[in-house]
Image: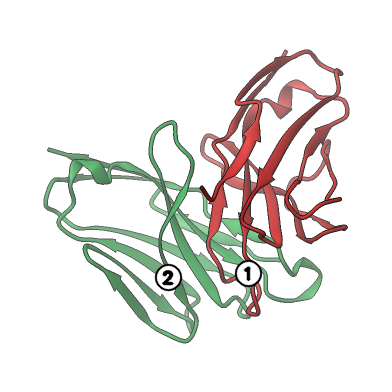
Amino acid sequence: GENVEQHPSTLSVQEGDSAVIKCTYSDSASNYFPWYKQELGKRPQLIIDIRSNVGEKKDQRIAVTLNKTAKHFSLHITETQPEDSAVYFCAAPSAGGTSYGKLTFGQGTILTVHP
Amino acid sequence: EAQVTQNPRYLITVTGKKLTVTCSQNMNHEYMSWYRQDPGLGLRQIYYSMNVEVTDKGDVPEGYKVSRKEKRNFPLILESPSPNQTSLYFCASSLYGAQPLNTEAFFGQGTRLTVV
């Protein structure tokens, strides 16, 4: 099955700085890599995703990059703002074998943006 | 409004007393799943269902049961709850189109369960 490792577990930045969170995965057949943001006391919500046929995707201040050879993908947040403070999760599906259909999340990164 | 609805939002129960957490979605999604969230461990998948009458174990299925008799509903059953099942639980659904699993997961609002 899929194994997803996420780093760092906590990240503290000053407002305006950039933040980068990295995930590695094990299933080479995985083809979809989403990132979710969870604000305090709320449900996780998708902020950006990438499919395996592209290497980078951008949406305003956030971007995701994918390196299929190395089996890792990263979330990049530029010009961070206090409202970016939240827990961020990456995820990857198991695309083959007996675990087909299982979705594995990373352990989460607590991002704190200081004004 | 498109949504995933879980009930109850909060539940305190005693060890061994069977309970059910309901989950319903109104988006005609094929894929539904349950997760538990514990500090430092992220979201761990308990069970998932790729369609009606099809369910599979996730990473932490022990102590839980599910059923998928209708497309919209996916209840989580704890036959004999224990204190180590105290956690925050999320239900989620995804469209699950032609390309497997490459669609956004929509989460319910969460159920905070305490087993004493």
Residue B81 as seen in the image, left or right of residue A52: right
Give the residue drawn at x 63%, y 29%: B87
Residue B16: give x, y in percent of width and height.
86, 18
Colour applied to chain A: green
Determine whether the residue tagged by mark 1 lies in a helix, strand or loop.
loop
Up/down of B71 relative to B18, above or below? below
Residue A53: give x, y in percent of width and height.
47, 86
Residue A78 as seen in the image, left or right of residue A76: left
Amino acid type, callout 2: Phe
Determine whether the residue tagged by mark 2 lies in a helix, strand or loop.
strand
Residue B43: give x, y in percent of width and height.
58, 46
Residue A31 as seen in the image, left or right of residue B15: left
Q: Chain of mark 1?
A: B
Name which quarter of the figure residue A82 lies in: top left
| Residues at marks 2 and 1, CA–CA distance in whole angstroms | 17 Å
Up/down of A33 relative to A35, above or below? below
Amino acid type, callout 1: Leu
Q: Nearer the viewer, residue B87 or B28?
A: B28
Q: Residue furthest front?
A: B1
In the picture, which chain is red? B
Residue B101, labelled with which disc? 1
Residue A110, labelled with which disc? none
Residue A73, labelled with which disc? 2
Q: Chain of mark 2?
A: A
